[in-house]
Image (cartoon, rainbow, N blue to C red):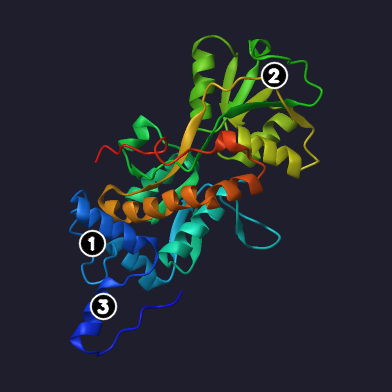
């Protein structure tokens, strides 16, 4: 990151340095100031950056809460590098904001927003659906992209349709929209039993070893996992129409609204200049996964 030069200069240059700002963050702050919509006292008036962005830059990195699930935001074991759809989007946002490094803290998905509000991470980025109940807990960015769930079954399974799940044992990950879908199926008598698994790895192991008859999980995750691990004798239930389709965003604390505006400014520029579409397509996602600027607006409650 190139730091803006400081030091004792003549008054005119000092003023110019305060006005000529780099990156999306400064553009976002300027826009918020003009509109009068963002009057958060957490903003640093000297740089035009939010207090949160300034803090992150001072420590040299942003700490992200994630459940370490591929292909969204995960640590690649072989390379030791963070990889995934969400990390690629976040890298570009951080580049435009002038954030030098990204670090991850692994947290169970169901506890991500709790840890965020406990100030143990700066932000949550993990293929998380923007839902009404979550908007009561944290502030969400505009939507990054959209997708839905899939049902994974053994390769030799006799299950041919959703109706064949009746009486069967199904696994899902608590805290996800997919667990809620499976719970709904259980309540309606469409499945026989629902078992909880803390992460994607144990979920896939459970169906691969016959502990459950099927699992319901993220469609993008399922497709990536099955293509990447040939040892899994599994397949996606098809044809299948998703019930829990939704739009994905990232979360920050309510008090970090100025920082949220800076992130959204960069995200929406990425949508308009084609950068976001390029990232999605690099992961095999079609235009159906893209959410435009207007359609992707998030209405936060606080």
Q: CA distance from mark 2 to mark 1?
A: 50 Å
Q: Which of pointers 3 and 2 indicates the residue nearer the eye?
A: 3
Tell me: residue 136, above or below residue 156.
below
**Quadrant in the picture for residue 213:** top right
Pointers 2 and 1 in contact (C-beta within 8 Å): no
Circle nearer the N terminus (2, 1): 1
Q: Position of residue 153 (x, y in %)?
A: 72, 25
Circle nearer the N terminus (3, 2): 3
Tell me: residue 234, above or below residue 250.
above
Tell me: residue 197, above or below residue 108.
above
Q: Looking at the rendered structure, which numbered label has been put on residue 16?
A: 3
Q: Which of pointers 3 and 1 indicates the residue nearer the eye?
A: 3
> Badge 2, how many Cα within 10 Å: few under 14, some, many 20+?
few
**Quadrant in the picture for residue 27:** bottom left
Secondary structure beneath dot 1 equals loop
Q: Position of residue 241 (x, y in %)?
A: 61, 20
Secondary structure beneath dot 3 equals helix
> Badge 3, how many Cα within 10 Å: few under 14, some, many 20+?
few
Identify which residue is drawn at 74% across, 32% down: 208
Q: Quadrant of the C terminus?
A: top left
Q: Does the rendering let one see residue 167? A: no
**Residue indicated by mark 2:** 239
Pick whichever, 12 or 240, lies toward us.
12
**Residue indicated by mark 1:** 43
Circle nearer the N terminus (3, 1): 3
């Amino acid at each position: 990151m190139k730091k803006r030069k400081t030091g004792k200069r003549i008054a005119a240059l000092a003023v110019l340095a305060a006005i000529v700002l780099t990156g999306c963050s400064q553009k976002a702050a300027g826009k918020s100031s003009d509109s009068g919509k963002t009057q958060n006292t957490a903003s640093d008036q000297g740089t035009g950056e939010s207090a949160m962005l300034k803090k992150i830059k001072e420590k040299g990195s942003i700490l992200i809460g994630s459940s370490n699930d591929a292909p969204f935001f995960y640590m690649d074991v072989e390379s030791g590098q963070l990889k995934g759809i969400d990390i690629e989007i976040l890298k570009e946002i951080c580049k435009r904001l002038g954030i030098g490094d990204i670090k991850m803290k692994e947290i169970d998905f169901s506890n991500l927003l709790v840890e965020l509000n406990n100030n143990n991470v700066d932000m949550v980025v993990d293929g998380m659906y923007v839902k009404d109940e979550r908007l009561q807990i944290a502030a969400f960015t505009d939507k990054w992209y959209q997708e839905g769930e899939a049902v994974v079954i053994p390769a030799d399974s006799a299950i041919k349709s959703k109706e064949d799940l009746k009486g069967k044992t199904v696994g899902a990950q608590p805290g996800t929209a997919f667990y809620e879908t499976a719970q709904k199926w259980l309540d309606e008598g469409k499945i026989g039993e629902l078992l909880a698994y803390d992460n994607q790895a144990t979920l896939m192991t459970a169906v691969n070893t016959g502990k459950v008859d099927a699992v319901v999980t993220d469609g993008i995750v399922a497709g990536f996992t099955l293509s990447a691990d040939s040892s899994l004798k599994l397949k996606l239930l098809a044809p299948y129409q998703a019930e829990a389709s939704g739009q994905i965003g990232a979360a920050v604390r309510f008090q970090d609204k100025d920082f949220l505006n800076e992130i959204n400014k960069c995200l929406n520029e990425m949508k308009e200049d084609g950068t976001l579409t390029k990232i999605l397509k690099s992961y095999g996602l079609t235009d159906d996964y893209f959410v435009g600027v207007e359609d992707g607006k998030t209405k936060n409650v606080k």
